[in-house]
Image (cartoon, rainbow, N blue to C red):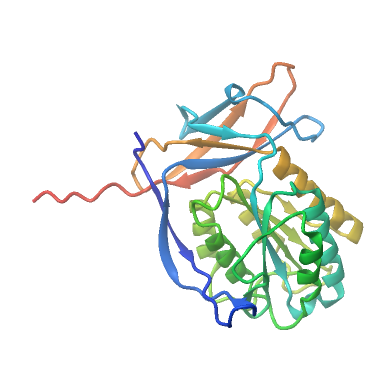
């Protein structure tokens, strides 16, 4: 029996332009639910190499220290839904070519059947592929979309993440990933970091963050990027060169393709934050490291209607 549901508030994308034109992402709150705790899992060996194709019986899931039966698992390079969240603020002008090259390197290394959407952000958030996704293999269309970006304005990073999380509403796919590429912190959002963290923890979306910071960047906030990534089982990258950016983008794609998705029915409806731990055993005796989201907020207890 499915005994619990995770509720979250999210931000909807509302079009402002006619069909065929770009759409602006406007915030409007609504609710959605998911009946399972979904865990994105990455496994590496002692050398940092990705470990794929482990069977379900090698995994164990603990909810607040209590073992839980795994309801489903995937891991054989299943197609995923990916949102590219791309900074197009004025300060990225000198780096925009690197950002485009990195995003294309990511797409080339991805499963060709992955579905990709693109949100760009400066003072506001814009759906660069209005209301639709494209397959990762359609590099020409993705390149045209990215090279059409024009750097201007300030940086609404939190608003962009909130809009991306909404696009990943439950039911969008078995595994969902956001990849944020930005050169700085936030200086234009109406949303807050607290909202981002609340929605990120309530979702089952993995967020990878890439910070392109200069040594004297006044808006640099690598700690925030680390916090957002760790809360969702993702990673933060801080490439110091164009070559390193390309390598990091490819690494993210490889992690997604080699990753696992585990799901289980949450044991409680208590409205509390539950800590999650995933353990893995290996027949070959390797020392394996597991990365996943640290926990989730359970649904609130049902309201009694008895008088």
Q: How many marks?
A: 0
Q: Residue at x 23, y 51 (%)?
A: 303
> Measured from the top left, where is residue 116 in percent x and y?
68, 58
Above or below for 57 versus 268:
above
Split into 4 quadrants, where in the image is the N terminus?
Answer: top left
Could you say which is closer to the camera, residue 280 or residue 76? 76
> Measured from the top left, where is residue 234 in percent x and y?
66, 48
Q: Residue at x 77, y 64 (%)?
A: 142
Q: Is residue 299 visible?
A: yes
Q: Which quarter of the figure has residue 183? A: bottom right
Q: Is residue 241 visible?
A: no
Q: Is residue 99 left or right of residue 241?
A: left
Above or below for 90 versus 249:
below
- In the displayed orientation, state which residue is furthest to the left: 307
Q: Is residue 49 left or right of residue 55?
A: right
Q: Residue at x 58, y 82 (%)?
A: 18
Q: Is residue 123 left or right of residue 110?
A: left
> Measured from the top left, where is residue 127 in percent x and y?
63, 72
- In the displayed orientation, state which residue is furthest to the front: 19
Q: Which quarter of the figure has residue 103? A: bottom right
Could you say which is closer to the camera, residue 260 or residue 15? 15
Q: Residue at x 74, y 17 (%)?
A: 284
Q: Is residue 170 left or right of residue 92?
A: left
């Amino acid at each position: 029996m499915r005994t619990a549901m995770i509720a979250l508030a999210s931000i909807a994308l509302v079009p402002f332009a006619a069909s065929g034109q770009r759409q602006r992402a406007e915030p409007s709150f609504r609710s959605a639910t998911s009946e399972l705790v979904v865990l994105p899992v990455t496994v590496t060996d002692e050398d940092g190499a990705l470990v794929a194709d482990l069977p379900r019986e090698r995994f164990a899931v603990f909810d607040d220290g209590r073992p839980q039966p795994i309801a489903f698992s995937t891991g054989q390079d299943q197609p995923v839904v990916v949102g590219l969240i791309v900074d197009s603020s004025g300060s990225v002008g000198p780096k925009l070519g690197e950002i485009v090259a990195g995003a294309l390197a990511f797409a080339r290394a991805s499963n060709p059947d992955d579905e990709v959407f693109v949100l760009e952000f400066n003072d506001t958030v814009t759906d660069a592929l209005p209301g639709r996704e494209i397959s990762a293999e359609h590099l020409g269309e993705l390149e045209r979309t990215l090279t059409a970006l024009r750097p201007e304005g300030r940086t609404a990073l939190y608003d962009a993440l909130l809009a991306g999380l909404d696009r990943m509403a439950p039911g969008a796919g078995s595994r969902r990933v956001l990849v944020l590429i930005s050169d700085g912190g936030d200086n234009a959002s109406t949303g807050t970091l607290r909202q981002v963290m609340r929605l990120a923890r309530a979702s089952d979306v993995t967020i990878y963050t890439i910070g392109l910071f200069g040594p004297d960047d006044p808006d640099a906030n690598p700690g925030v990027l680390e916090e957002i990534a760790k809360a969702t089982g993702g990673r933060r990258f801080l490439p110091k060169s164009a070559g390193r950016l390309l390598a990091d983008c490819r690494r993210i794609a490889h992690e997604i393709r080699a990753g696992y998705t585990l799901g289980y029915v949450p044991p409680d409806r208590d409205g509390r934050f539950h800590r999650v731990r995933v353990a893995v055993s290996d027949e070959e005796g390797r020392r394996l490291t597991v990365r996943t989201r640290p926990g989730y907020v359970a649904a609130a207890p049902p309201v009694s209607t008895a008088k």
